Amino acid sequence: MLKEKLENLEFRGFPEPTENLPHGDMPGDKIRIDETHVRKAEKIFPVLLEELKALGTERAVISVFGGSGVGKSEIASLLAYYLNECGIGTYVMSGDNYPFRIPLYNDAERLSIFRANGLKGLISSGQYNEEVQKELSALWETEKDPDPKLSEEYPWLKSYQEAGRKALKGYLGTRLEQDYDEVNAILQAFRDGKNSIYFKRMGRSEEARWYDSVDLTETDVLILEWTHGGNVNINGIDIPVLLNSTPEETRAHRRLRARDGKTDSDFTTMVLEIEQEELTERAKYAKIILSKSGEFMSPEDF
């Protein structure tokens, strides 16, 4: 079906975005389309069409991934809109529905891992004592313990931060945090031609978990939009699309979208930096890479 539609496709220009754009299926998620998103989506779309044509498959899975807040949701929505307008049925799946814990508990788990292993690092380095614990407790209260600049004032803090960061890196985006098996099962069912699939929904409270049965009878393309959409644990992505940005740029975008109440915290900065390390590693597998400024990049640019 997809192959035939692409062969007969006559692209006649980009339609104006409407208020009812298709968007990711995470409950309560907000998208704000601006001219920057439109410009980037319009640049990606013709290349994406050529990649889809080269596949020669009846269904295709696209991943739009990048740093938190880089604009994945907005650009995935626009790409889905353009595909639908061309007669290619498209569904947008939000990977943010697939961590094991709701955001509140997952944020707490991340911080707990960092602090618990930071303490172990102090013990291992021989720098732990009662005075250090008092100073560290004060830093915990102000949430300044991840701030690297404070290591000049507290020389022991470097060992604490290094050990905590290493442990945090072993959690973020791994199978300990994200349910890749469930994501892979959905992608495989779609590729196998299943026309009704249960998609998970996860809100911001413990009771806000459920599944919706989605009719995919007329769906040719599934777009997975997710920070971890390029992760090594995901199977079945036909066209990985990476939106590149720096941690500083993604933090600014998160602030606009009000993704959390601690966008500017030192801990959030650390999380974004670790995420960027994963993205840089996975860039070599992306078929399309677009910079924050809207220019195409090659894997070698990383």
Image (cartoon, rainbow, N blue to C red):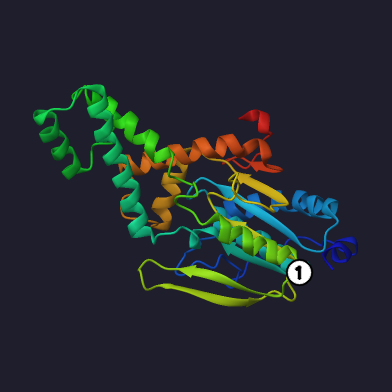
Residue 9 or residue 103, whichever sits in front: 103
Query: In the figure, residue 25 lies in which quadrant?
Result: bottom right
Callout 1: SS:
loop
Would residue 53 be found to the left or right of residue 19 on screen?
Answer: right
Q: Give the farthest residue toward the front.
A: 124
Relative vertical location of residue 60 with respect to residue 127 in this rendering, above or below? below
In the image, residue 230 lies at what x, y percent?
Answer: 60, 46
Q: In the displayed structure, would residue 292 be above or below residue 155? A: below
Determine which quarter of the picture holds residue 160: top left
**Place of residue 247 in the rendered image (x, y in percent of width and height, measured from the top left):** 45, 39
Q: Residue at x 66, y 52 (%)?
A: 235
Give the image location of residue 82, x and y in percent: 71, 63
In the picture shown, does residue 118 fall above or below 126? Answer: below
- Type of amino acid at the residue the image marks with label 1: Gly
Residue 34 visible in the shown view: no
Residue at the image position 54 percent from the left and 49 percent from the top: 228
Q: How crowded is mark 1: few (under 14 residues within 10 Å), some or many (20 or more)?
A: some
| Residue drawn where x is 54% and y is 58% of the image | 95
Residue 205 at x, y percent in the picture: 35, 68
To which residue does mark 1 refer?
A: 193
Picture quadrant where residue 14 is located:
bottom right
Q: How many labels does the image show?
A: 1
Which quarter of the image is occupied by the N terminus? bottom right
Left or right: 255 as drawn, with respect to 128:
right
Q: Quick check: can you spot residue 67?
A: yes
Where, quadrant-wise, is the C terminus in this rendering? Answer: top right
Residue closer to the observer: 34 or 237 = 237
Q: Residue at x 33, y 58 (%)?
A: 105
